[in-house]
Amino acid sequence: MLLIACPNCGPRDETEFHYGGQAHVAYPQNPDALTDREWSEFLFYRDNTKGEFAERWLHSTGCRQWFNMLRDTVSYEIKAIYPMGAVPPGRASSGARARATSGTAHTTQKGPQS
Amino acid sequence: MAETAERESAVIRGLRRSPVAHLAEEFAQGSVEGAHGVALREVPFLTMVGLRVNPASAAGERVGAVAGGLPNSCGQVGGAADGSGTGTLWLGPQEFLVVAPEDVADDGGPAALVSALQQALGQDAGQAVDLSANRTTFELAGPSAREVLEKSCALDLHPRVFKPGTAYVTEIGLIPALLWKVDVQTYRIFPRASFADFLGRWLLDGMQEFNAAQVS
């Protein structure tokens, strides 16, 4: 059982929370211009990181607010908890860097806007 | 017009049934007196109003004045924190639950309180909705009440942490519920109506051991 420190409510059991998948997956700037493959990659393709992973969580039976968490997928250690929309601690430049290797890279290379 | 409304509300009051009315007898039988006692009862038909407003805004201040003060953070209760009058529980940063006696607002009932809150809110962002039928209220009281709760609530309920006049949104017996400590040995538990039967029986089960003779 993880003990998760909700930014609003303090430490609570993992059972009070719901997992929201990978964080910082940016919505495409021009979804209509995407090919089916690019769109499906945005919708369904997520990183499967071994190690530090930025993810979203919802305190569903508490304050019902979303927040981001930086968690080690091997040791389950919670490295940081930070608000929605914020840049993950230790990744000062771009919040979308986690996706830069997969989805975002495809859209910038193949998208008609480039 | 007013008379008709009064007559109708009197009829409705006579017809309504609380979610665990059928367990009242079992609650009375399962309650234990004495040094290790714990009593469970339902407090039916409390007035509850769901509030959504930014407490830092002007509207938040106006609404807070009607509700008796909005809580600032998790655990806090605005207004009457001992459950004696109108208290406001913190559900989220911009979400609150006003809990008041059934005959609040000079016996105007929930409708009067809701319209007062809506008037205070005005045209600003937010809402005040009558949620009186959404949840029911259990009152668990007695020297062993904390022990009963600790069987199925993961919060730290020790008195040095969980003080009278605080309330939390949490899980009790694996269902989402509000837990409000109104007094040193008295807790109010607010489960949703559809979970009330389950939680009532669950708490009764937890109380059973205190009914047995003490082994010295």
Image (spheres, coloured by chain):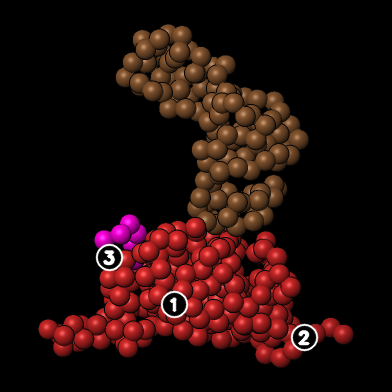
Chain colours: A brown, B red
Judged from this view, the residue extending furthest toward the bottom is B34
Subunit bearing disc 3: B
Instruction: Choose between B3 and B97: the one closer to the eye.
Output: B97
Residue B57 seen by the camera: yes
Q: Earlier in the sequence, mark 1 or mark 2?
A: 1
Residue A72 screen position, x and y as percent: 71, 34
- Residue at numbered disc 1: B68
Q: Nearer the viewer, residue B128 or B146?
A: B128
Residue beneath label 3, please? B122
Is residue A74 located in the magenta-colored stretch of the structure?
no
Residue B54 x, y percent position in the rendering: 42, 59
Chain of the residue where label 1 is placed in the rendered structure: B
Q: Which residue is mark 2?
A: B213
Tell us which disc is closer to us: 1 or 2: 1
Residue type indicated by callout 1: Gly
Asked if residue B99 shows in the view, the reply is no
Question: Helix, strand, or loop for circle 2?
Answer: loop
Say which element carries label 1: loop
Residue at image position (36%, 64%) is B59
User: How far across and how far down the image is residue B120, in percent?
Assistant: 31, 70
Whether discs 3 and 1 lie on one chain: the answer is yes
Residue bounds of the magenta highlight: B122-129
The mark found on residue A20 in the picture is none
Q: Chain for mark 2?
A: B
Query: What's the residue at 64%, 29% (across, down)?
Result: A91
Q: Earlier in the sequence, mark 2 or mark 3?
A: 3
Q: Quadrant of the C terminus of chain A?
A: top left
